[in-house]
Image: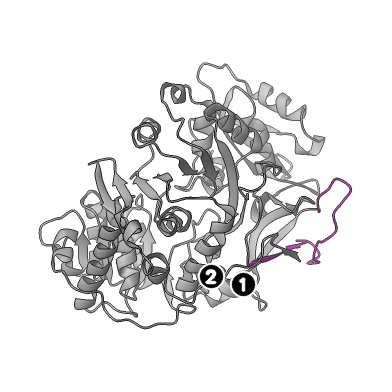
Amino acid sequence: MFTSPFPDVEIPDVSIYDDLFADLSADDAARIALIDPATGTETSYGALKAQVDAFAGALAARGVGTDTVLGLLCPNVPAFATVFHGILRAGATVTTINSLYTAGEIEKQLRDAGASWLITVSPLLGAAQQAAEAVGIPVERLVVLDGADGHPDLRSLLGEGRAAPEVSFDPATHVAVLPYSSGTTGIPKGVMLSHRNLVANVAQCRINIDLKNTDRVLAVLPFFHIYGMTVLLNLALKQRATLVTMPKFDLVQFLTNIQTYGCTYLYIAPPIAVALAKHPIVDQFDISTVHTVFSGAAPLDGETAEIAARRINARMMQGYGMSELSPVSHAMPYTRDDIPVSSVGTILPNIVCKLVDTETGEEITEIDDDGRTRPGELWVQGPNVMLGYLNKPEATAETLDADGFLHTGDIAVYHDGGYFSIVDRVKELIKYKGYQIAPAELEALLLGHPKVMDAAVIGVLDDDKQEIPKAFIVPAPDSGLTAEEVMGFVADNVAPHKKIRRVEFIESIPKSTSGKILRKDLRAREHAG
């Protein structure tokens, strides 16, 4: 069993609203909580709290309470913070929905979550309306924040000036949010996270992540995703930092916003790190205010991280988590600079972990001569572990054992420096002639090639029906990169069994909004071919 190098922190037995807003001082109330680059509008912490309370009051007046589930389909705009925390302040449950979803996907999530309300913005109203009609949500419960004929809007609801309701629930058991796991390897499931889960993870993250009230955070990772929800939105609000919102990623706009608003702290997914490391346009902007870049949501290879850090003269950090962990269990502590950026850092406070051999089920504790354990599945226990999957007791039992350990499905190693590295996913390991090959290792190597802009590796069957590694490569423009060059480069740098045996050049690697490689899409492409 592995424990955190940090002592346990106190986790208040309160709602997430009380944790973030109850102790708002006069000085903090005057601080800027949110900036909208589209309009230049600034929202103070005092104004945000008042809006949250008023929105909760408006919902309560319409019968919303502790047994209500509301869908939130909204990109990163300041109103997201008002609505998200207003729903929670009313004691209801919010299921956050991917802004890129089709009407059919929205409908599935609303139906599965049991949502009786949907809150959205006018650009997404078409799909939202179809989904709402399909599940029987009436027009008066389809809120369009920026206004649309026949629907309630944010301005009018806040304008009612209602007081927030009196609500009572147990923070440890009441479901606050229902994000849906990304579905990169299976059907998305509703992850039940309690108020205590959210409060705990903010308290845990504060130890490793040194976000201050003087920081300006560029909020480009979606708030609907658990990473954006906890590490951007909730942690930034707790620390009284300023959030500069971005509804979608565009590299030029991203760099412009950093330059215009003097952003200091960036939370990113690996594709943005690749752009910071390799894209020529980065040099055209002054982003010298950035002192820290924190990457999560998918593995980032160390070389890309180091190139990006050197190029923009900022500290690069990495962490690990998943929706089921609210989401962070590991992060590089800002107090240590001896931990390689290729790792995910140390265990957060109040958490214990195990590494378990996937073949034998035995616990791995022994550190080998090379200063690390052999790889095993990472199991995590702590106050940030989910309550379970909504209406899926079998899936819950498969993932969460009787001792409260969450079986992450990720393969990790522990280093004698007290930190962990994620090697790959259990389901994504390639078995070649009895050897296990981690696609992430090969992808990290490939990204180090100067002619490779992006890469993904999956297992495919050869003519003898044996699994072999195949690389999908996005070549640098006009580089003339060949398959032979790619295979030779890998062969020069890995053991023989890890060699890439097939290469396909493609225009882009399919990825989720959080930056995870969608291997299922690559497999589908392979089967279609």
Q: Is residue 405 left or right of residue 123?
A: right
Q: Secondary structure at mark 2?
A: loop
Residue at x 10% of width, y 57% of height: 149
Q: Which quarter of the rendering shows the N terminus?
A: bottom right
Residue 70 against residue 429 in the figure, above or below: below
Three-letter amino acid code at the position of disc 1? Leu
Q: Are dots 1 and 2 in contact, CB under 8 Å? A: yes
Farthest-out residue, right: 369
Q: What segment is highlighted magenta in the picture?
A: 350-374
Q: Is residue 525 left or right of residue 91?
A: right
Residue 489 picture location, percent across and down: 71, 25
**Which of labels 1 and 2 is toward the front?**
2
> Tag 2 or tag 1, which sits nearer the N-term?
2
Q: Is residue 131 left or right of residue 511?
A: left
Closest to the observer, 398 or 142: 142
Farthest-out residue, left: 149
By what rule are the colours in the image chosen?
Answer: one colour
Residue at x 85% of width, y 58% of height: 366
Residue 365 picture location, percent across and down: 82, 61
Q: Secondary structure at mark 1?
A: loop
Number of marks in the image? 2
Residue at x 23% of width, y 76% of height: 60
Q: Is residue 293 left or right of residue 108?
A: right
**Dot 1, how many residues are within 10 Å of its Cα: few (below 14), some (14-19), or many (20+)?**
many
Which residue matches tag 1?
Answer: 400
